[in-house]
């Protein structure tokens, strides 16, 4: 009797090779970190380094747990709904539409009522959502997707807003935030890898609902740790009502600051493409397999290994030491677009799987790129409000992508996503030009000095 589950050799071998390769690259990155000059702006050093590492661990521990819990759901949500025999597209669309509608209000709540408090709300709602998923009832599942649209906005802005604000409040150098984002991207991928493997084990043992049982336990654990976080808010402490109107201030930032507008648009294009891909990878691979079984959790783990690989490659001692984050963003768009061109022209498993792995590596690099650029452009007091406003076009793109799959073949939809990625690449070039120009405030100070 075999100790290992009966997984297809192609899926198992792909994961093993990727895991070994990523581990080797991580070793190279670790050795380069050791050799990097301590004077590097991105490398934490000096008297504040120990305090920074303690703060970083406090954040990344929670980040690892919540992302693993989220990935536990992502691995088997499509197959769970398929086993229930419900309208999968309608449920996914409900989540994305809710995310678009609620993005603005959620951003305001994050800044107004406190980042820690909204993180707690997220964790409580996620426990409720995962319990609801146990019931084969369309109305209950629809409610869970409405709640999921709200919690997704908090997940991808609330925790990052708390970290950015707390980072600056404690007086850490701005350059050090790149180290946190790089580690977060690596941990995100690592959490997803573990979640993918364990989700496959849970699904084998308890059926498609198994991973959601594990997600409940992990979310409850994260809730315990978040309770010990200090609170921080948007707006200005002791400021007037006008100075604390984060909705109006965020809208003013987006409409008057070219860098903020461009950065938000670029982020929406990349993540809109990414989430459309998330909806499509399972049915696309099922089609390529032509009736053969798809070990969803194991393939998911391979895809997430590539996200970890991207996080390692982004590190200050690796690609970020060669070129700026904004230039890396252009590369992510171009390489990602090239990768997703493959399923437009091919129906074979090997090239499609390979293209998906390359795309996910680009995702792993772009996520910390976007985080670093957002921390440069968006002020602390507007982190939640401004970032969530751009989740409106992001979710709109995902809704379009999801709807298109109901009426057109997947190769056509992948072609649309490639166009989005190419537009994003062009706008990212404009972002580079905008960031190279001094801000209006800097220009004024230079004129006064003259």
Image (cartoon, rainbow, N blue to C red):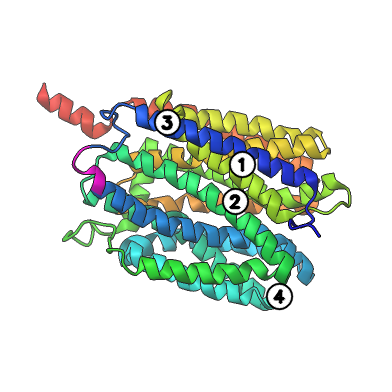
Dot 1 crowding, Cα within 10 Å, few <14, some 14–19, many 20+ = many
Please give the name of the residue rendered at 66% of the width and 73% of the height, measured from the top-left corner.
141
Q: Are marks 2 and 4 in contact (CB under 8 Å)?
A: no
Mark drawn on residue 19: 1
Q: Are marks 1 and 2 in contact (CB under 8 Å)?
A: yes
Please give the name of the residue rendered at 42% of the width and 50% of the height, measured from the top-left corner.
387
Please give the name of the residue rendered at 28% of the width and 60% of the height, measured from the top-left corner.
233
Q: Main secondary structure of the magenta part?
A: loop
Q: Between disc 2 and disc 4, whose residue precedes? A: 4
| Label 1: which secondary element | helix
Q: Nearer the viewer, mark 4 or mark 3?
A: 3
Q: Between disc 3 and disc 1, whose residue precedes? A: 1
Q: CA distance from mark 2 to mark 4?
A: 30 Å
Q: Nearer the viewer, mark 1 or mark 2?
A: 1
Q: Which residue is mark 2?
A: 193
| Label 2: which secondary element | helix
Q: Which residue is mark 3?
A: 31
- Place of residue 385 in the rendered image (x, y in percent of width and height, measured from the top left): 38, 55
- Place of residue 234 in the rendered image (x, y in percent of width and height, measured from the top left): 29, 57
Q: CA distance from mark 1 to mark 2?
A: 9 Å
Q: Between disc 1 and disc 4, whose residue precedes? A: 1
Q: Is residue 393 visible?
A: no
Q: Which residue is mark 4?
A: 138
In the rendered image, the quadrant that contains the N terminus is: bottom right
Nearer-the-camera pick, 27 or 45: 27
- Place of residue 94 in the rendered image (x, y in percent of width and height, measured from the top left): 63, 64
| Label 4: which secondary element | helix
- Place of residue 391 in the rendered image (x, y in percent of width and height, measured from the top left): 50, 52
Residue positioned most to the left? 449
């Amino acid at each position: 009797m075999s100790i290992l589950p009966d997984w297809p050799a192609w899926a198992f071998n792909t994961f093993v090779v990727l895991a070994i390769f990523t581990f080797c690259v991580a070793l190279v990155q670790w050795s380069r970190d050791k050799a990097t000059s301590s004077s590097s702006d991105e490398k934490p050093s000096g008297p504040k380094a120990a305090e920074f590492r303690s703060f970083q661990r406090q954040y990344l521990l929670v980040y690892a747990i919540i992302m693993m819990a989220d990935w536990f759901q992502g691995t088997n949500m499509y197959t769970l709904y398929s086993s229930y025999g419900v309208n999968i597209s309608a449920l996914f669309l409900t989540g994305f539409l809710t995310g678009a509608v609620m993005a603005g209000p959620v951003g305001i709540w994050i800044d107004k009522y406190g980042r820690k408090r909204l993180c707690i709300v997220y964790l409580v709602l996620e426990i409720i959502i995962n319990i609801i998923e146990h019931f084969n009832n369309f109305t209950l599942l629809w409610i869970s997707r409405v709640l999921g649209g709200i919690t997704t906005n908090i997940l991808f802005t609330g925790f990052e807003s708390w970290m950015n604000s707390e980072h600056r409040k404690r007086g850490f150098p701005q350059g050090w935030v790149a180290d946190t984002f790089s580690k977060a991207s690596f941990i995100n991928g690592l959490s997803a890898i573990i979640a993918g493997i364990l989700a496959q084990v849970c699904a084998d043992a308890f059926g498609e609902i198994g991973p959601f049982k594990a997600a409940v336990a992990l979310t409850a654990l994260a809730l315990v740790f978040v309770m010990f976080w200090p609170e921080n808010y948007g707006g200005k402490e002791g400021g007037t009502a006008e100075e604390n109107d984060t909705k109006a201030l965020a809208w003013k930032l987006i409409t008057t600051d070219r860098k903020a507008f461009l950065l938000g648009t670029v982020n929406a294009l990349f993540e809109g493409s990414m989430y459309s891909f998330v909806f499509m990878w399972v049915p696309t691979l099922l089609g390529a397999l032509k009736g053969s079984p798809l070990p969803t959790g194991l393939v998911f783990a391979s895809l997430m290994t590539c996200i970890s690989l991207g996080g390692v490659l982004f590190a200050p001692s690796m690609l970020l030491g060669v070129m700026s984050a904004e230039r890396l963003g252009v590369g992510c768009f171009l390489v990602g677009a090239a990768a997703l061109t493959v399923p437009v022209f091919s129906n074979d498993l090997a090239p499609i799987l390979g293209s998906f792995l390359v795309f996910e590596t680009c995702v792993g690099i772009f996520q910390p790129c976007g985080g670093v650029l957002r921390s440069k452009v968006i002020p602390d007091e507007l982190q939640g409000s401004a970032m969530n406003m751009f989740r409106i076009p992001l979710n709109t793109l995902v809704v379009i992508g999801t709807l298109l799959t109901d009426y057109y073949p997947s190769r056509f939809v992948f072609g649309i996503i490639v166009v989005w990625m190419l537009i994003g690449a062009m706008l990212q070039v404009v972002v580079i030009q905008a960031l190279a120009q001094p801000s209006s405030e800097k220009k004024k100070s230079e004129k006064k000095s003259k």
